[in-house]
Amino acid sequence: MDKTKTLKIVKICLLVILIVSVFMAFRRSQENQASVRDYNEALEIAGILGPKDFSNLTSTAQKEPDNTDPVIKDLNGIALDALKAINDEVIGWIEIPDTPISYPLLAGPDNNYYLKRNWKKDPNGDGAIFLEETNSSDLSDYHTIIYGHRIMFSDAMFSSLDNYRQADFWKDHASIYIAMDKKVYRYDIFAAFETNVKSTVYRLDLEENQEMFIEFCMKNTTINTGVIPEVGERILTLSTCTASNTNRRWVVQGVLREEFDRNYSRES
């Protein structure tokens, strides 16, 4: 084969690769836009985005005291029943105030189901925010893990967790809130670090090894929060992928410090 024919074949191959790449990028962009619409819909249904009308809810919420945390105020009135009517695998709502993280929390049949499905079970590469398949759906385990994608070209899903590499970001976003049917939980963030998919972070048999687990997390954290979990306090791990390696994960961890009934009463 002469050089002219070889060069022609190379050019054709490169053109095909370019066309496929452009098509895949366009398709992924369209998918991401669809995901944004779907989750904006969830915000509207939940009563977080747009006019808030909770008159049709079955919640026992009463008028909040003047000193009530404004985040608790909003999450107390969240319309979980309306979300569950669309997908009964919605178990709650997760929010880190003043960040893009404000999503329905799902409990699927396994850890793969919501990787490529949105909160309504529709196919979408952005996936959903979902509970580790072996965790209790009432968040009562000593260690609970929640997963979400890191979307490369947007702040969607768990992408903004990467900001916890900086202590200044943590100072302004120090707590994770989860609203459930009867409770709203506040977890104070104590650690953030990159780890391997087979590390201690992903062990769930830690009831008898709590001191070891806490020591591991505090040793690996990249930010010094001054928050140190005590043995017996429940721990939450938010997990997302990294850009560096398919076997690496970025995790942000919180310790349960307060829980509120859905009538604004506080339990600490």
Image: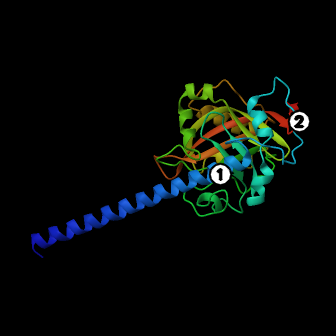
Residue under label 1: 41
Q: Are marks 1 and 2 in contact (CB under 8 Å)?
A: no
Q: Secondary structure at mark 2?
A: loop
Q: Residue at x 54, y 38 (%)?
A: 162
Point out the image quarter for the N terminus: bottom left
Amino acid carrying mark 2 in the image: Gln
Between residues 63 and 144, which one lies in front from this camera angle? 63
Residue under label 2: 62
Amino acid carrying mark 1 in the image: Glu
Answer whether residue 88 is visible to the viewer in this image.
Answer: no
Q: Residue at x 63, y 61 (%)?
A: 112
Q: Secondary structure at mark 1?
A: helix
Q: Position of residue 200 (x, y in %)?
A: 65, 45
Answer whether residue 158 is visible to the viewer in this image.
Answer: yes
Q: Position of residue 195 (x, y in %)?
A: 56, 43
Answer with mark 1 or mark 2, whichever residue precedes in sequence: 1
Q: Place residue 191 in its image quadrant.
A: top right
Q: Which disc is residue 106 wearing?
A: none
Q: Position of residue 56 (x, y in %)?
A: 84, 48
Point out the image quarter for the C terminus: top right
Tell me the distance, in whole angstroms, between the alpha carbons under discs 1 and 2. Answer: 26 Å
Judged left or right of residue 170, residue 20 is left
Judged left or right of residue 228, residue 66 is right
Label 1 CA crowd tier, 10 Å (few <14, some 14–19, many 20+): few
Between residues 148 and 43, which one lies in front from this camera angle? 43
Q: Position of residue 15 (x, y in %)?
A: 26, 65
Between residues 201 and 151, which one lies in front from this camera angle? 151
